[in-house]
Amino acid sequence: MTSYGVAARFTLFVLARNRLAMVFLAVLIPVGVALAYNVVSHDVLPFHHGSTGSVILGGGEKITMISCALNASCQLIGFAMFSSAKHAEDFDLRLTAAGYSRTAILLSKLTSLTAFAALVAAYAAGWMRWFWPMEQPLSMWVAVFLAGLVYGAMGLFLALFLPGQLEGMFTIITIAITDLLLQNPLINKSSGGGLMEALPAYGAMQLGLGAGFTSSVPGSAVVSSLLWTVLFAATAFVAFIRRTRVA
Amino acid sequence: MLAVAGVRKSYRKREVLRGVDLDVGGGQLVGVVGENGAGKTTLLRILCGQLRSDAGTVEVSGRLGYCPQKPVLNNDLTVDQHLRYFQIAYRLPELRRADELIERLGFGEYRGTAVKELSGGTRQKVNLVLALMHDPAVVLLDEPYQGFDWETYLRFWEIAAGLRAAGRAVLVISHLAYDSVRLDTLHRLRDGVLDHAVAVSPA
């Protein structure tokens, strides 16, 4: 328990010292949400809500706000987790070789991911709520939280294969932008289908749209995000166990 | 206390170690020298269990302490936070040995400082303390004094002599032989094998 407690405390401490991530958090999310509210047309448009199969109405600025908040959160959490995993790579190896519990280190990484995603989601959902009295603010928090979990786990996963910070940042930004561009109902009028539903941000976007404009919570969207999180995190953790196994 | 027999290692087709044999007993201070790329670090990583050899055996009696060539630290954590991490890893009830080493290496004033704000030499000192703070029976040091000033360099050798006097088995890797007079035995790693030991000073 001590080993988990100390590892979790230090991992969170290191994450909090990531100044770039903190400036991103403080500035990028409110600026993105405020720009979406002020710049995009407030015209109400019908769009297809894939996970419930219904057509719903939403203001362009609100849909863009959801998209911006998810995009910023995905990039921020994805890169912060990538960066912290990359920095700690050799140190973790030394620590486990010295006898530190690998389970404690893994759990501390999961804890920092969950805590950071929860914080970012609260901040993002709070700013959105400031501009827009939405149907279900709590579900909006869950949507951003799940997006953060998926991309944070993706960051841990990519840290296994990509050599440096620049490669990680570029890859995560590209994936997040492409993913959320395709998910945006203002741009993509298609009703989705299998391929669309298989994208990492699908669940979070569907849940965000449901939270903004309906009173229902699409359970399948939550499952989709959790599956992505488990897939990325499990692969990263198995690789960690293999790497830290004493020869 | 450290017995190595027939260790081989290849990276793809390049054979780096071609049957290394080495014995280091308690109270012995043994050096291994070799040119850049001779495989010294590869050998040490195999000895400490970080790398798997293709063939051969490595036997270590008692706890092992390994000091890597480049400091392996977490930049955002302070010196004290590093000590706390390794205190748990080594299951130490207290930090008496670490306190003593920090005092001897003279960097007590930086215990609350984040490692990234320390000079290269001080980072190397932290690196060394983490390898020795559990008073291991077998000590593997990979050029542990890079970045040390002359004073600290001399203190390092005092610490190494202290380990020998306390009956520890100490293996020091270097690419220079100029500290050979401080060793009991010096080996040269050449063409993937260790030359026969040359006694360089009375034990």
Image (cartoon, rainbow, N blue to C red):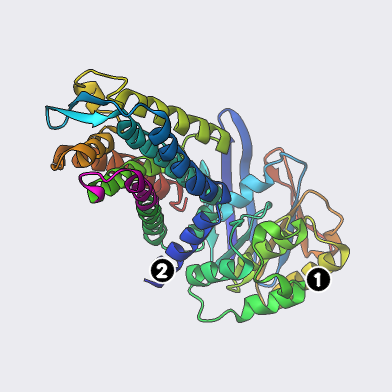
| Viewer-proximal residue among A6 and B86 | A6
Q: Which residue in the protein does label 1 denote?
A: B155
Instruction: Identify residue type, mark 2.
Output: Gly
| Viewer-proximal residue among A134 and B164 | A134
Quadrant for the C terminus of chain B in the image = bottom right
What SS does tag 1 mark?
helix
Instruction: Identify residue type, mark 1.
Output: Arg
Quadrant for the N terminus of chain B in the image = bottom right
Label 1, residues with CA under 10 Å away: few <14, some 14-19, many ≥20: some
Q: Which residue in the protein does label 2 denote?
A: A5
Label 2, residues with CA under 10 Å away: few <14, some 14-19, many ≥20: some
**Position of residue A116 measured from the top left corner of the image (x, y, whole percent):** 40, 53
- At horizontal 51% and vertical 70% (from top left) the residue drawn is B90
- Range of residues picked out in magenta: A120-137
Q: Determine if marks 1 and 2 fall on one subunit.
A: no
Taking the magenta stretch, the answer to whether it contains residue A130 is: yes
| Viewer-proximal residue among A72 and B160 | A72
Would you say A68 lies left or right of A185 here?
right
